[in-house]
Amino acid sequence: MRDDHETRQAVVIDANKLEADLLATELPSGFFTIEPHESWLMNDAILAPGNGGDFAHPMYAFYATQGGMGVSLDEVFHLAQASAEDGPMLGGIEFDLWRPLRVGEDFRVDARFGGLRRKHGASGVFDLVELQLTLVDSGGCAAAETSITYLFPRREAL
Amino acid sequence: MTGAVCVGDEVTPFTVERVDSEKMKTVAALLRDPNPIHWDIEVVGRLGMGSRPINQGPTNMAYVINGLQAWAGRAAEIRHVSVRFQGNVFGGDRLIAGGLVTRVTRDEAIDLLTCDVWLDRDDGDRVLQGTVEVALPSDTPTTEK
C-alpha cells in the first residue's frame, strides 16, 4: 500500500495550479516574543559576539518571522505538497530590518505566499516557493519584512 | 586601522574554524525546524546528501552578518540582507565569510554601505552569496581598513 505522501509525489504536480492555490491561501497571523533565554541560546549557537545586550541579532528578522507565523513549517510544506522527509532546503532569504529588534519585544507576524517558480536543474526538478512575512510591533508598525524561498525537490514531477 | 570606508574596501574575513553539529540541534529546537537533515545522518544519507549533518542556511547567513558586524563595529546597523544559498555546509567544515564594499552613500548622519558578501568552505566551494546594506554613523571608523 502506498501512503498519501508517496501517492502525492507519484503524480505530476501542476506548478501553475499549485501556485494559484498558494496565492489564494490565507495564512493566519501569529505572534513572536524574543525571549531573553532563547536569544542567548541562539547567539551562542550562531557564534554571535556580545551576548546579553539589549538588541537581538539581525537574523531575528528571519527567526521571529518564520518562528512566529501562524502556521507551522510542516503546514507550509504540506500546503506546497511536500513534507520534511523530502529534504526541502532554503533557497534564499531577504529581509529589510526597519529598526533594531529588542530582546523581550512582542510582535505579530503576518504571512502570505509570494509565488512559485519551477526549475529544472542538474539534480532534477524542484519548485521554489516564496513566503512573505512582516514583523509588526506593538505600535502597529512594521519592524522587519522578510522573504523566504523554500526549495522543494520534485522527484516525480515533470 | 581607522578611517572612512571607501568602495573597494574589504570586510575583514570572519572564520568559523569548525562547524559544530551539536549547535545545529539547538538551532533546530529553537526554530521548531522539523527537517531531520540537521540532526539525523541516516536521513542525510538516504537523501544522497552525504554522511554528516547539514548546517541550517540561516546559521550560515548569521556567520556572514557576524563578520560584518565585527568589522563595522558596535554602532553599525544591518538594514537589508539578501542571500542565495548555493551549497551545503556540513558538521566539521571550516568556513570563511568575506565581503567587499561596492557602494557608499553619505549624508550628515550616516554612511550607508552596500557590500557584496559570501561564505566559502575551505575547500573553495562558495556556499552562500548576496548583498548587505549596513548603516554607520558618519564618524565611525571600521575596525580594519
Image (cartoon, helix red, strand yellow):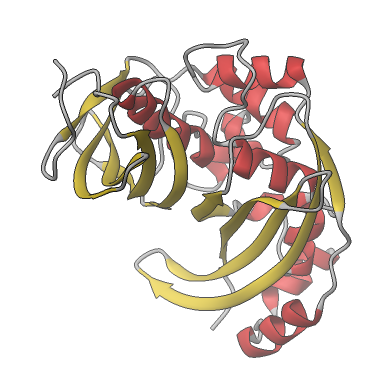
Which quadrant of the view contains residue A28? bottom right
User: Which of the 4 quarters of the picture holds residue A147?
Assistant: bottom right
Q: How many marks?
A: 0
Q: Position of residue B23 (x, y in %)?
A: 57, 18
Q: Indicate left or right for A108 with A112 as reference.
A: right
Image quarter in which the N terminus of chain A is found: bottom right
User: Can residue A151 be seen in this snapshot?
Assistant: yes
Residue shown at the point (70%, 47%) measured from the top left: A66
Viewer-closest of B135 and A45: B135
Give percent across and percent down for residue B132. 37, 46
Q: Looking at this rendering, what residue extends furthest in the front direction?
A: B108
- Identify whether A87 is placed above or below B110: below
Q: Residue at x 62, y 28 (%)?
A: B39
**Front-lying residue, A16 or B141:** B141
Above or below residue B80? Residue A127 is below
In this rendering, is residue A86 above or below A118? above
User: Which residue is more in the foreground, B142 or B37?
Assistant: B142
Where does residue A157 sit, x and y in percent of width and height? 58, 78
